[in-house]
Image: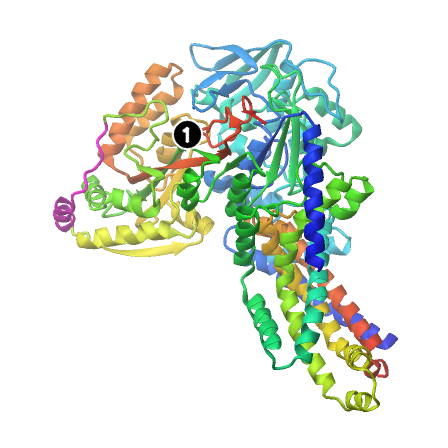
Amino acid sequence: MLRYILNRLLLIVPTLIGITICAFAFVRLLPSDPILALAGEHGVSPERYAILQHKFGFDLPLWQQYLRYIWQLLHGDFGISISTQRPVMTEFLILFPATLELSICAIVLAIALGVPAGIFAAIKRGSWVDQTLMGTALVGYSMPIFWWGLLLIIFFSGILGWTPVSGRIAVQYFIKPVTGFMLIDSLVAGNRAAFFSALHYLILPTIVLGTIPLAVIARQTRSAMLEVLGEDYVRTARAKGLSPRRVLGLHAFRNALIPVVTTIGLQVGTLLAGAILTETIFSWPGIGKWMVDSISKRDYAVVQSGLLLIALIVMAVNLLVDVLYAAINPRIRAQ
Amino acid sequence: MYLKHIMKAALVGVSLAALAGAGASAKSLVYCSEASPANFDPGTTTGGNDFDASSRTIYSRLVEFVHGGTTVEPGLADKWEISDDGLTYTFHLHPGVKFQTTSFFTPTRDMNADDVVFSFERQFKQDNPYFTYLPNLTWDYYQGMDMPKYVKSVEKVDDLTVKFTLTEPNAPMLANLGMDFASIMSKEYADALLKAGTPEKLSTEPVGTGPFQFVDYQLDSVIRYSAHPDYYKGKQKIDDLIFAITPDATTRMQKVISGECDVMPYPNPADVAALKANPDVVVLEQAGLNIGYMSYNTTQPPFDKAEVRHALNMAINKQAIIDSLFAGGGATPAVNLIPPTMWSYNKSVQDDPYDPEAAKKVLAANNVTAIDLWASDRFRPYNPSFQRAAELIQQDWAAVGVTATIKTLEWTEYRKQGKAKDRPGAFQIGWTGDNGDPDNFFATLFSCSAIGVSNYSSWCNKDFEDLIQKAKVTSDIAERTKLYEEAQVVFKREAPAFTLDHSQVYAVTNKKVSGFMMDPLGIHRFDGVDKTE
């Protein structure tokens, strides 16, 4: 088991190097650069452009810039944003809790609805229930987030007026960030009304961000259940005369859970990618919106380090899933 | 089940929120701004959203622009004298102006000449400790307005008198001093920060003399201000001003409709008609301080001949392009380089008529058959689609026997290649003004020295140059007006460019808001705004 984890950890090193190269190259492949983006409509004279290039170190050969970046990283320095002049890490730490809060809510929603839906569809395989559930899941999976988000806003906020349009909490509540999680901070502040307001503001973005994972989890649960239900041990359990409930819950579901857990773990990538669009639509102050802004400003420092940090999170979660997978699956544990 | 629970909780939350709201008597206004400010030091930033959040709320300047216009009026300086040679500007400061008292700073003195000197010196004196107080400072606007070239010194004469000495006469200087980068900072506060070893806080915990004072900023989310109780022009009626940062235009529109925000800038042009029909909101509009145009490179044949340039202009159906780009209105055809809202606009100038027949003859006589036509992928206020405009111009030119090849590039690369002196072809571009001074259009876009920078026509005409340079060094407004009117005649005669349009700028407020005005300079101001509860 320990060797397994060590192996996994070793794999992270080349992956990380690859990511730094990709992130570094990606922003620089885009046309334009931070100086031109900052200068805006004015443009900038060639002389001044040269001075600024030198100031930011953009006049160095690319490999030197890259080595400089790696050198900084090795010293724990993620760089300084070119547009806001704040350390990238500081901004990340302020914004990440918002993304995390939204992602947790979305994945909880996806599991809470997706797993039962999948089980139900598997039990009623081939029936209209199965077909409706899986059809809906397919639609959910295919829906573009941007369109889906705006549609929900227009219907529930615009026409019905049930939910707020965007933001994290009603503006009259002034909650000082302690943990960065609005739900927790409002409770820490002892402000019940603020807590409910934060909950209210979470509804639509949670649905939008949770839709794709929900669809994936439902479909995965269904197929895993179907596979397990066909196994010999399930037939044996049934033959023993166990109640259908016990057969499903104890024998079938627990075994079906293994691929489902993996799927849930893999949704972290989907969630972070989805957060970029969801946060932009709902003015949610997280790292997704931050990335979009920084790309349009060609803020090299933020984009390259931000991507690296996001990749680190995805890798950490994947590692956790691998370990968890081994822990719950005896066949892997034995290796 | 889960959802139902949340809905229930949410409804409770709403009613509690309503109760909490009813208890408070403070008047608050929510502005849904379009982007997060980079920071709160207007000397260091360049975006309109940066300025809305800092210079127009927290700070004041020596001179100000009339709310809703481009003329300059007294600000922190009650009056000023300009020497006859145009080299010395002496400003007399308003006595008793208070800086804001915030949770992080309590001023001990009123605003004085030291503050003014500091506010400018920090932007050009390399030995000023604030010249490099943030890691990557470039002072873009101070540089962009050519201030280092013109400003020789800024000196304190006495506590309430400041003298600016210029290297050469430059009439637009006064308008420059009303711009955002010229906001007056507190030297006392800056010194205190320096002493505490935290100068960078000047950009995150701002102190100024403006109508609203900074309370808190939650990154990328909400900015809070409260009325400055000792504002030198009187305390504002709005007690709490809140910026809710909302980047998506559709979301912003829904927020203003649902009453979550009171004012929003920049609706999608396509939504304007629907907003106008909505009884709960008010749509404000104004001709923007901008111009969309197409530059011919006058150094390259066949564009070196004025008659060819005129003929190409005459072949284009301008109104049809505007109707197509701005469905449902939203722009007016441009005759001159400056918009009609700007002083010195020459009403008597006649535009090239739409006359394909006449154009065809001239173009055939000059053997013009093929042209490069440049387009970019970027939405600009004065041109929502360069690509669409290019296609329409291509059709119009095809009708007169000229084949246009459309060259499309990404926006920044586009401008980089476009400003090359020997760039071939016709280049679509535009401009949004900074300070409401005609010089900011004429000299920036078509002076000889702007070739290779922002003179996309590489056009250097002696008559035009003489007029605008003379206007630049004359302080008398009536005299300057005459010179610029004449310059517009020369411009139209020589036709270095095809002037397309001036676009409308929109803002939307809800019915409860009063006193909000659009500004041709593209800024959003909340002084003088009120709201009925």
Task: Identify the residue position indicated by label 1 in the image.
Answer: B440
What residue span does the magenta drawing correspond to?
B349-366
The kind of secondary structure element at disc 1 is: helix
On the image, the x and y values in percent for residue B335 come to: 27, 34
Front one among A268 and A148 = A148
Residue B153 falls within the magenta-colored stretch: no
Q: Is residue B105 above or below residue A57?
A: above
Q: Is residue B260 visible?
A: yes
Callout 1 environment at 10 Å: few (<14), some (14 to 19), or many (20+)?
some
Screen quadrant of the C terminus of chain A:
bottom right
Q: Residue at x 50, y 31 (%)?
A: B511
Q: Residue at x 72, y 53 (%)?
A: A101
Looking at the image, residue A53 sits to the left or right of residue B315; the answer is right
State whether residue A64 appears in this view.
no
Res B55 quadrant in image? top right
Report the front residue among A103 and B52: A103
Q: Is B365 included in the stretch rendered in magenta?
A: yes
Asked whether, in this view, residue B298 is left or right of residue A142, the answer is: left
Query: As drawn, which residue projects farthest toward the right?
Result: A2
Residue B12 placed where, x, y %? Answer: 71, 44
Disc 1 is attached to a residue of which chain? B
In the image, residue A167 above or below residue B55: below
Residue A189 rendering spot, x and y as whole percentages? 81, 39
The residue type indicated by label 1 comes to: Asn
Counting from the top left corner in percent of width and height, residue A103 is at 70, 57
